[in-house]
């Protein structure tokens, strides 16, 4: 099951259990939620291509004690609505859920208007914003169910790229996938798949992060004796460098990063071609790891 289909399944289940949950769609997802429209006509709405207004509506719902969920494509949810997310939710300390699809370049052939590798970096600058990057549909289900009603603004970054295996994940906690001595490799969300391919024969620790904010500093402190870190994220590279430095200071460390370069991606085609270009493949990650270990 894809993450998008899991979103519908998870939310439909919660709509039955939690009368406070209200869904606001931005045209995308209307077909998937067609049954929910019929079953919950006063709690599932398609607002359309009015993303900034939708965030304002969601804030109003939150102020009345309801739990809003806003769902649309990443650039329209994050880049178009940054001011509303900051002022209406962050500044007001309101709870709400913002679920995107498209991630960095899932809609590769549609070009820059539909790419959004800057989403996590943008939202990290809003105090109190929680950020979840699941690697599989099952992990989204776990993480959303754990955190959707926690009273804080939370961003869920869904992707068409998924890891092969799902893990039992806990909101705000990283998973230790493998232990080794020579380096620590941090894989965020769906980057775990190529990281596992690259590191299968390497003496390294692999830490798997499905929550980016809050960042689990403790598991990193306890699993980075080498001081050598390879950070792999499915968005603009280097987003978590500050958190890593804060977690490990005053120890001397060396960090290498793999992610989307800070440039517009003009290589129209399929997402896998972008993976090759940015080095998010098992073979490319292994090359970077060897350089770090040398």
Image: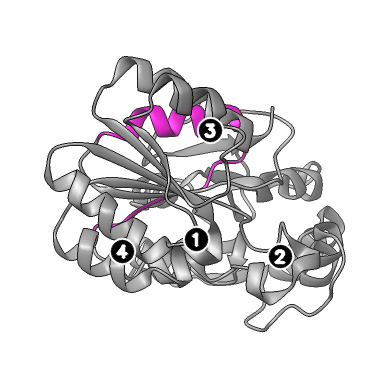
Residue 167 location, quadrant:
top right
Q: Distance between the residues labelled 3 and 4?
A: 21 Å
| Quadrant location of the N terminus in the rendered image | top right
First-in-chain label (3 vs 4): 3
Numbered label tally: 4
Tell whether position 146 is magenta.
yes
First-in-chain label (3 vs 2): 3
Kindly identify the residue that appears in the image at 28 percent across and 50 percent down. Answer: 58
First-in-chain label (2 vs 1): 1
Mark 1 lies on residue: 49
**The residue stretch that appears in magenta:** 128-149
Mark 2 lies on residue: 293
Identify the element where label 2 is drawn: helix
Q: In this view, does 291 lie above or below 72?
A: below
> Is the residue under label 4 in contact with that under label 3 (CB below 8 Å)?
no
| Quadrant location of the C terminus in the rendered image | bottom right
Measured from the top left, where is residue 116 in percent x and y?
Answer: 59, 67
Q: Taking 3 as reference, is 35 left or right?
A: left
Identify the element where label 3 is drawn: helix
């Amino acid at each position: 099951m894809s993450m998008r289909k899991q979103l519908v399944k998870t939310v439909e289940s919660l709509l039955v259990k939690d009368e406070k949950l209200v869904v606001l769609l931005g045209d995308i997802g209307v077909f998937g939620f067609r049954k929910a429209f019929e079953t919950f006509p006063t709690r599932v709405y398609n607002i359309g291509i009015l993303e900034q207004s939708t965030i304002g509506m969601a804030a109003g719902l939150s102020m009345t004690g309801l739990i809003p969920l806003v769902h649309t494509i990443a650039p329209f949810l994050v880049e178009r609505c940054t001011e509303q997310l900051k002022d209406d939710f962050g500044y007001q300390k309101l709870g709400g859920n913002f679920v995107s699809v498209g991630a960095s370049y899932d809609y590769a052939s549609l070009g820059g208007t539909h790419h959004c590798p800057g989403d996590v970096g943008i939202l990290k600058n809003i105090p109190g914003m929680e950020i979840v990057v699941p690697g599989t549909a099952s992990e989204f289900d776990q993480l959303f169910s754990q955190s959707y009603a926690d009273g804080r603004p939370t961003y869920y970054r869904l992707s068409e790229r998924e890891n092969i295996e799902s893990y039992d994940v806990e909101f705000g906690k990283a998973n230790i996938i493998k232990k080794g001595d020579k380096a620590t490799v941090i894989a965020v969300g769906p980057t775990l798949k190529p990281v596992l391919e690259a590191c299968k024969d390497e003496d390294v620790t692999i830490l798997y992060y499905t929550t980016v904010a809050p960042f689990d500093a403790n598991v990193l402190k306890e699993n980075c004796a080498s001081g050598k870190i390879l950070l792999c994220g499915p968005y603009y590279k280097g987003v978590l460098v500050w958190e890593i430095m804060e977690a490990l200071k005053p120890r001397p460390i060396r960090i290498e990063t793999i992610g989307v370069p800070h440039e517009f991606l003009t290589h129209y085609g399929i997402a896998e071609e972008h993976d090759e270009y940015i080095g998010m493949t098992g073979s490319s990650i292994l090359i970077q790891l060897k350089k770090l270990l040398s």
